[in-house]
């Protein structure tokens, strides 16, 4: 893993990888959403409202995957002092927060016609809102306490503590069975008809690729900033 | 022992302790979170008319009746042991159908009818196109605890 500790070696790989993730990701997302909107049949009870699923569910998955990534990167930062770990955690935070927000907004839009309410303080909805606030807290903390592109240890500790919320979100529909339905897709199989399942998977893969591309872009920007700062300092010293 | 390993063990212990604490708190909350009355608990609780309460249960098959004004609907909510008549005036959610789960905010009137001010419908985890709705979903593992009797 420390092979990539050298930023220029990382950049050599990250630079061509960014468009290789971004363009197929964008294509998959647009294709899946277009197919889902025009070709997927209306659902037996909800009609066309069901099509929000193609954005809502991938956004929820990525919001949770993002914090899992932050937690792993934080552990790597604290234990192995890997120089890129903090930078990658910080790069994940903004798209993670964005996808959590998309999940909450699309969920609310879906909830009004389907459930009859924009919002309820249900276990799943509340824990997802907490995740969004955790992201905002992490971003603020990392910005306030870090310098030279490196993330402070306080932010890393916060990233690990916040991970407690991830299994809570996952289990919330089982523990507090109130408004949100239980998981449709589990290790045992899926309760979603194939007509929705395939565009959903395509959209999920597409959004994941986009997420990866955004993280790489932000990491490259952070590394570039560090370089600029170092160069400026050298110029100032001469 | 290398310092790196010490740090790894420290982080792991902290993580396990945190998750354990959160799980304990969650399971304690679970006992407390009484979200609504079911018809059976409502019958036992002797709630006085006019007191704001929340009722949850399944919409009984064949019980939905729409009034002539087009916006008032009356139906029966049931659980395993009891039934409760509910009336509601307003737009019903898409997922409000016979056999589906429903949560209503409102109060009992003097005649024992639950007058709902808001109506929330619950979705189960199945997503099925309209053309396929007649196939038997009850065989699916997922549906077994959410399908109405």
Image (spheres, rainbow, N blue to C red):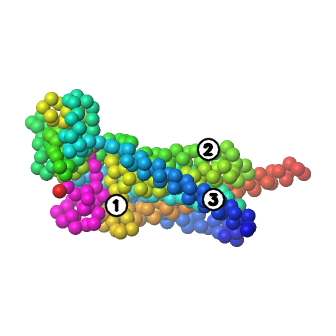
Q: Chain of mark 3?
A: B
- What residue is disc 1 on? A184
Q: Which quadrant of the view contains residue A6?
A: bottom right
Q: What span is colored magenta in the figure?
A: B119-148
The one nearer the camera, A28 or A110, is: A110
Mark 1 in CB contact with mark 3 (< 8 angstroms): no
Q: Residues within 10 Å of mark 3 (few under 14, many from 20)?
A: some
Q: Does B131 sit above or below residue B26?
A: below
Which residue is pictured at 25% across the width and 57% down the height? B146
Q: Residues within 10 Å of mark 1 (few under 14, many from 20)?
A: some
Same chain for the residues at labels 1 and 3, yes or no? Answer: no
Which residue is pictured at 33% across the width and 48% down the height? A178
The one nearer the camera, A67 or A215, is: A67
The label nearer to you, 1 versus 3, is 3
Q: Chain of mark 2?
A: A
Which numbered disc covers residue A140?
2
Q: Residues within 10 Å of mark 2 (few under 14, many from 20)?
A: few
Q: Residue B46, how many percent across, how many down?
A: 21, 35
Which numbered disc covers residue B11?
3
Residue A48 visible in the shown view: no
Q: Is residue A189 magenta?
A: no
Q: Secondary structure at mark 2?
A: helix
Outermost residue toward the right in this view: A238
Q: Residue B129, how many percent across, how many down?
A: 24, 60
Q: Does B67 sit above or below residue A224?
A: above
Distance between the Cα atoms at labels 2 and 1? 35 Å
Figure disc tally: 3
Helix, strand or loop for the magenta stretch, by majority: loop
């Amino acid at each position: 893993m420390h092979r990539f500790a050298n930023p220029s070696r990382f950049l050599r790989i990250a630079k061509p990888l960014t468009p290789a993730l971004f363009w197929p990701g964008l294509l998959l997302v647009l294709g899946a959403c277009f197919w889902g909107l025009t070709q997927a049949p209306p659902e037996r009870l909800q009609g066309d409202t069901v099509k929000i699923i193609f954005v809502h569910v991938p956004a929820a998955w990525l919001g949770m995957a993002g914090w899992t990534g932050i937690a792993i990167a934080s552990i790597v930062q604290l234990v192995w002092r890997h120089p890129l770990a903090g930078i990658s955690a910080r790069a994940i935070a903004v798209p993670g927060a964005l996808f959590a927000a998309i999940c909450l907004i699309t969920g609310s839009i879906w909830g009004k016609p389907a459930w009859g309410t924009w919002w309820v303080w249900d276990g799943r909805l509340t824990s997802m809102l907490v995740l969004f606030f955790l992201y905002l807290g992490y971003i603020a903390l990392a910005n306030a306490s870090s310098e030279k592109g490196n993330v402070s240890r306080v932010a890393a500790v916060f990233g690990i503590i916040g991970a407690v919320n991830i299994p809570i979100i996952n289990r919330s529909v089982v523990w507090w069975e109130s408004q949100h339905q239980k998981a449709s897709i589990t290790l045992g199989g899926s309760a979603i008809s194939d007509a929705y399942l395939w565009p959903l998977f395509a959209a999920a893969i597409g959004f994941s690729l986009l997420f990866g591309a955004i993280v790489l872009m932000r990491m490259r920007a952070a590394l570039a900033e560090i370089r600029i700062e170092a160069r400026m300092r050298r110029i100032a010293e001469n | 022992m290398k310092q790196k390993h010490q740090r790894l063990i420290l982080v792991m212990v902290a993580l396990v302790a945190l998750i354990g604490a959160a799980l304990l708190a969650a399971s304690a909350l679970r006992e407390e979170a009484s979200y609504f009355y079911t018809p059976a608990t409502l019958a036992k609780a002797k709630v006085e008319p006019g007191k704001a309460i929340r009722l949850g249960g399944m919409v009984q098959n064949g019980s939905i009746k729409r009034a002539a004004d087009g916006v008032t609907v009356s139906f029966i909510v049931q659980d395993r042991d009891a039934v409760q008549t509910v009336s509601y005036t307003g737009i019903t959610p898409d997922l409000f159908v016979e056999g589906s789960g429903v949560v209503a905010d409102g109060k009992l009137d003097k005649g024992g009818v639950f007058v709902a001010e808001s109506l929330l419908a619950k979705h189960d985890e199945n997503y099925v196109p309209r053309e396929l709705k007649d196939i038997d979903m009850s065989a699916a593992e997922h549906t077994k605890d959410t399908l109405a009797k």
